[in-house]
Amino acid sequence: MHQQHFEESNNCIRERFKDLKQKSPEKLRTRLNLSWSNWGFGRESLADSASRLARSGVPYIELHGNHYGPDLGYKVDEALTILTDHGLRVSGVCGMFSADNDLASNRAICREAAIEYLKREVPFTRAVGGAYLLVVPGAVGRPQEYDEVEFDRSAETLRAWAHLFSDNGVKAAIEPIRSAEVSLVHTVAEAKKYLEAVDHPGVGHINGDVYHMQSEERHIGYAILDAGEKLVNLHLADSNRCAMGDGSMDVCTIIRALYLIGHNAEGRFVTFEPLGPGGNPYPAMHGKPDKAKLDALVSTSIRYFRDCEGMVLAE
């Protein structure tokens, strides 16, 4: 054996990228669209978050899907005013699905809460100009399955209200999450099976996450290639879920794979979501923000990724 298996896969993707560059250089002229998911900023105001992203040259923001009730969450006009003042646009909205609003739940009241959440969040996503709403088939933080039919129950529940996405022109982006956090849909292949089970034109896309991919996929680059045009957004963090460049994630192979599927197109995004190490990142959602640390997190991550992208394109 001359190479480890992951090295063989890396080299295959590198050669495919070189071939693309030689035969269709025009497909590499547009850079990847960078965004940042702001729910990891904790209780910080949207204005402060927008200011930080603007200073680091981040053109898009993925908004925290915080409409947990009819009287909660961002107001459309206020949010748009803040973002416009800072030159930001919305890539999409990070849908938040817990045991309280679980599409797969065996308790009808929890599935109903998930439906009501979608009724609020999908129109909000349209109103702020977002391309997608992230949807998780089962509750995050519930790795134990309810029963053997929870996959079917989740797909049936989402199918019944999938028209919300079609009616509002918003893509439902199904996110595979590692098995330590959810009980179903852990890989790109399983996300595609879920899309087939929902079987509705309003639900046809995937939100990838490299942190989960490194746990569940054989190779991150090939998982991206497998997702193909269905991939509307990719969440980024380094291998330790910290700033890009602080771990051992193979960023260049990820970038090559993204260009190979034409991800550098309008309406497709790479969104940073470095939530920190550990099994439960969600306390960060309610935490008091350390502005200096967050400033460094954003500036370091963006600079490192753009440097890697520059190296790849210069090969």
Image: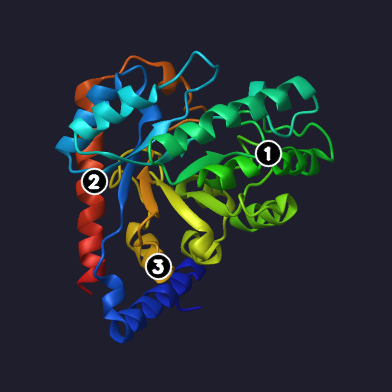
Which quarter of the rendering shows the C terminus?
bottom left
Q: Position of residue 29 (x, y in %)?
A: 24, 70
Foreground residue among 139 and 2: 139
Circles 1 and 2 in contact, beta carbons < 8 Å: no
Q: Residue at x 20, y 72 (%)?
A: 314
Q: Residue at x 61, y 50 (%)?
A: 202
Residue 228 location (% of width, % of height) = 51, 65
Answer yes or no: is residue 275 visible.
no
> How many tags in the picture?
3
Residue 200 at x, y = what percent?
68, 52
Q: Nearer the viewer, mark 1 or mark 2?
A: 1
Q: Against 295, is 68 above or below?
A: above
Q: Which residue is mark 2?
A: 302
The local crowd at label 1, few if under 14, some if 14 to 19, many if 20 or more residues have their Cα within 10 Å, is: some
Query: In whole angstroms, how far apart are the C-alphas of marks 3 and 2?
Result: 21 Å
Label whose residue precedes the other's in the sequence (1 or 2): 1
Q: Earlier in the sequence, mark 1 or mark 3?
A: 1
Please identify, in this view, whether the residue under mark 1 or under mark 3 is nearer the observer.
1
Secondary element type, mark 2: helix
- Residue 250: x and y, percent? 37, 58
Specify whether 138 is left or right of 172: right
Residue 74 is marked as: none
Q: Residue at x 79, y 31 (%)?
A: 146
Q: Is residue 45 visible?
A: yes
Distance between the alpha carbons at the discs numbered 1 and 3: 30 Å
Residue type (three-letter) at the residue carrying disc 3: Gly
SS type, badge 1: loop
Q: Nearer the viewer, residue 89 or 185?
A: 89
Disc 1 designates what residue? 161
Disc 1 marks a residue whose amino acid type is Trp
Give the label, 3 or 2, closer to the camera: 3
